[in-house]
Image: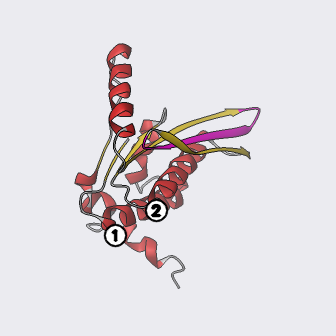
Amino acid sequence: MNFFPSFLSEFSLGKRLIDTFSDHFSFHMQKQDIKDHLHNLDNIAISTSTDPHSIMVILDTSIRNNIATSISHIHLYNRLIIKIIHHVVNITSTETELFAIRYGINQANNISNIKYIVVITDFLYMAKNIFNLLMHLYQIYSAIISWKLRNFFKKDSNNYIDF
């Protein structure tokens, strides 16, 4: 018996998020020159803060003394709307980052009229792995995040997310 029928499409070839909505998301790696990178981040922040249909999710995670801390800042139209701090014991940095990404996307998805999500994270390689369903240890995170993004993309064919 399958207890998670809504996740089946995330694992089926040809029906995965990366197969059906590949033009709805992109990843931007940090450039070698830090000045160019900071300039690009400034431009993203300015353009996002002036668009009422854009939301910026800024994530930071760390682990000290076996306690993971995740801080999520969610900005909409030039104002902070949510700031959440999570502390968890005995969890990996990968799980912490995936949880923060999941939380940020979930919050953005719950706000009406959002068409564009910008996720700024220091774990971009982990965000890319959301679409890698071969990471067996983290498949549940990937499936949930993919499911949330699928719902976001289905709301409007122009919806988009940048990491």
- The residue that mark 1 highlights is 12
Left or right? Give the position of 47 relative to 120.
left
Q: Is residue 52 above or below residue 12?
A: above
- Looking at the rendering, the stretch of residues picked out in magenta corresponds to 64-77
Q: In terms of secondary structure, where does tag 1 sit?
A: loop
Query: Would you name the residue on which mark 2 appears?
Result: 143
Q: Which residue is found at the position 43% from the left and 37% from the top?
A: 124
Q: CA distance from mark 1 to mark 2?
A: 11 Å
- Residue that appears at 44% across and 75% down: 6
In the figure, 68 relative to 138: above or below? above
Residue 27 falls left or right of residue 99: left
Provide residue 132's location: percent of width, then percent of height. 39, 52
Locate residue 21, reporting x and y percent: 26, 59
**Toward the viewer: 48 or 6?**
48
Mark 1 or mark 2, which is nearer to you?
Answer: 2
- Left or right: where does residue 144 sit relative to residue 89? left
Binning the other alpha carbons within 10 Å of mark 2 as few (below 14), some (14 to 19) or many (20 upward) gives: many
